[in-house]
Amino acid sequence: MNSDTAYTYFEKSGICAGMRGAFTPEVALETTRALMEEGINVFEFTMNSEQPIAAMRAVKAEFGDDACVGMGTVLSVETAQRVLDATADFIVSPAFQPDVVQTVLAADVLVAPGVTTPSEAVAAWDMGVKLLKLFPIGALGIEYFKAIFGPLNHMRFMCNGAMNDTNARQFIEAGAVACGMGSWLTGDGTWPPSRVRSRAFVLSNAVELARTGRAPRLEA
C-alpha cells in the first residue's frame, strides 16, 4: 500500500485505533474484528507492545485491503526498516526525527511523525509528510489545536494523546483529519471484544456527528 492509498484510509475513517500492551496476534485479531464491526479499519500497533510485528502481520493477513495496518512508536531508522520489511501500511512516531521520516518517505509509505510546535509541523511538512501527528494534543486541549491549525490549515493533522469520544469529536469539528485513539478505545489487551465494540460504537457515532451533523445511531 503506497502513501496516498494509506492516507485515504485515514481520511475516510477519521479514527486510527492504537493497540499498546498485551496485543498478541490472537488478541489483536479479536480486537480488530470488534472494531471492524463498527466500521473502524485503521489499526496501529506499537513497537513497545507484545509481539507487535507478528500482530500486525496477522491482522494484515486476515483483512487484506479491507484494513490499513501499520506500526507506531517507531523511534529509529533501524526499527523503521524492520517495520517496512514487514510490509506496514504506515508508520507513526511520537517524535519528529528527520532520518526516520526520510527512510519511510523513500519507501513511499505513509509516515506520521509526532509534532507539537508550529516549527516542527512546518519542518516535517516541508519534507513531504502528508499527515502530521499532533501529540500530545489531548492533554494540551482544543484551543491549542485551533491556535496551530489557524495559520497551518493547509496541513493535515491527526490528533493523538489523551483522547476520548468527546475531545475526538471536538478536534474533528475543528479541522483534524483523524484522531489516534489508544487506551480509551482498545484498552491494554485485556478487555473483552464486547467492551471494545461498545467503545467503538460510541466513538464512530461521535466522529459521524462531527463530520455530518447527523444524529448518531441509537444502538450497537
Image (cartoon, helix red, strand yellow):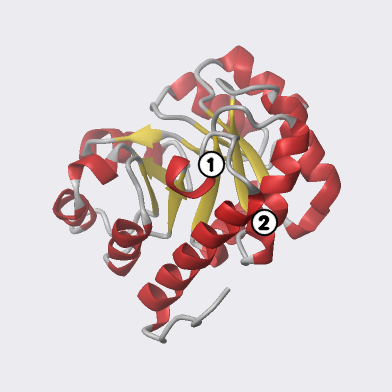
Q: Residues within 10 Å of mark 1 (few under 14, many from 20)?
A: many
How far from the left and from the top, in percent, is residue 98?
44, 23
- Residue 97 vertical placement versus 29 (above, below): above
Q: Residue, x 59% and y 59% (percent of image)?
A: 197
Looking at the rendered structure, the kind of residue marked 2 is: Ala
Q: Quadrant of the C terminus?
A: bottom right
- Residue 165 vertical placement versus 184 (above, below): below
Question: Which residue is under mark 1?
Answer: 18
Kindly report the distance in space between the C-alpha atoms of the residues bearing marks 1 and 2: 14 Å
How far from the left and from the top, in percent, is residue 214?
41, 86
Q: Residue, x 63% and y 66% (percent of image)?
A: 39
For this orientation, the residue located farthest to the right is 61
Q: Number of marks in the image? A: 2
Direction from residue 119 to residue 186 in the image, left or right: right
* SS state under label 2: helix
Q: Front-most of 209 and 30?
A: 30
Query: Marks 1 and 2: which is nearer the front?
Result: 2
* SS state under label 1: strand
Question: Which residue is under mark 2?
Answer: 34
How far from the left and from the top, in percent, is residue 65?
79, 56
Direction from residue 33 to residue 115 in the image, left or right: left
Looking at the rendered structure, the kind of residue marked 1 is: Gly
Mark 1 or mark 2: name the one nearer the start of the chain: 1
Q: Residue, x 28% and y 59% (percent of image)?
A: 153
Q: Front-most of 77 and 57?
A: 57
- Residue 40 vertical placement versus 86 (above, below): below
How far from the left and from the top, in percent, is residue 97?
42, 22
Residue 186 visible in this rendered orientation of the protein: yes
